[in-house]
Amino acid sequence: MRGVVMFAPGDVRVVDREDPEIVEPTDAIIRLTATCICGSDLWPYRGIEPAEHTLMGHEYVGVVEEIGADVHTLKVGDFVVGSFCISDNTCEICRSGFQSRCVHGSFVAAAIGTQSEFARIPYADGTLVATPTMPEPELIPSLLAASDVLGTGWFAADAAAAGPGKTIAVVGDGAVGLMGVLAAKQLGAERIIAMSRHPERQALAREFGATDIVETRGDEGAAAIKDLTNGLGAHGVIEAVGTQESMMQAINSTCPGGHVGYVGVAHDGVTLPADQLFFAEVHLLGGPAPVRRFLPDLIDRIWKRSIDPGKVFDLTLPLDRAPDGYRAMDERRAVKTLLTL
Ligand SMILES: [Zn+2]
């Protein structure tokens, strides 16, 4: 089969990979219908994370081709959406809603690599969710978004305690930040402040529900949020970048007693000063999103066409042109690239 491999930073190629096979009785093999490039794929692309013959891709939708003997909730021919985290969905951690930290969990990235024609999905019953029937083609981008970027934005909005009457600020105007805006709106937030200095991303943020735009960042950005909220800070802040500046911007933009939902992948060197945290007096919850918790609800909203997160894809290319998709996102010419098969 064809699949995307990153040989070294900046060097992605579509190469022949071995076809996956059932290994464990709880596995399923899916044929990908669509996949995409994640903002987090840019970390190795830019040399910030190691890349050495790395299998790429962790977002996926597709059709079940084959199931192991111990798969019970899915059948061959089902259209499925899966999380970027493998989970059994039965252990104590999964049942508490943190499937991204399942005791049998692993990451789809690198180990599986779903920028490919086929993928072996472990713990298929716990990881994959089937749609009611075969989706209309126009729903595919939105269902694909649910696999990570929407699910991650949703988790962040949930962790930021978005809800009726709340003011939510969003740090980061990448795909996850934009999905955080959409999620906050869906969860009933009254006011949503998107922090972005890019006109086209501001427009998309407004389309997804942003009521205010702040163009400054860092301490200046946090001060601008306080100016908009009677000097108090937002009730909840979504952090969708993962840098020192963005984390502190999020914490400093939050009102005392408020909530920060952080989902930007943090890297080495990001540290939180305990003295500032102590006096900030905010709730912090984040990490790899337990997308599986939200998938049934997200699929339902997409199926009813009450949300259209697929709009976050502004570039669509065939899998064979994946290197062009990486380049476009690296140069910020594209928010998010969908790869067709
Ligand atoms: Zn589990």
Image: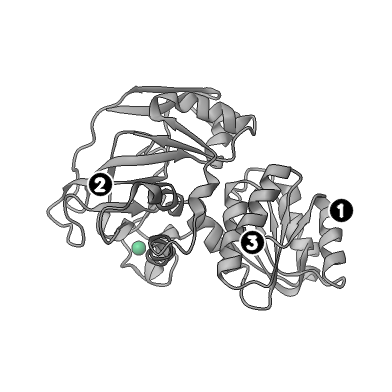
Q: Is residue 338 above or below residue 214?
A: above
* Residue type of the residue flagged with mark 1: Glu
Q: Nearer the viewer, residue 153 or 258?
A: 153
Give coordinates of residue 294: x percent, y percent: 43, 65
**In the visual, does 231 lie left or right of 43?**
right
Residue 49 can be seen in this image: no
Q: Nearer the viewer, mark 1 or mark 3?
A: 3
Q: What residue is pinned by disc 3?
A: 209
**In the visual, does 321 lie left or right of 16?**
right
Give coordinates of residue 340: x percent, y percent: 38, 35
Q: Is residue 175 above or below residue 7?
A: below
Q: What residue is pinned by disc 2?
A: 63
Marks 1/2 in contact by CB < 8 Å: the verdict is no
Q: What residue is pinned by disc 1?
A: 220
**In the visual, does 142 lie left or right of 179?**
left
- SS state under label 3: loop
Q: Nearer the viewer, mark 1 or mark 2?
A: 2
Q: Residue at the spot x=39%, y=24% of the render?
A: 320
* Residue type of the residue flagged with mark 3: Gly
Quadrant in the picture for the N terminus: top left
Q: Residue furthest left?
A: 69
> Dot 3, how many residues are within 10 Å of its Cα: few (below 14), some (14-19), or many (20+)?
many
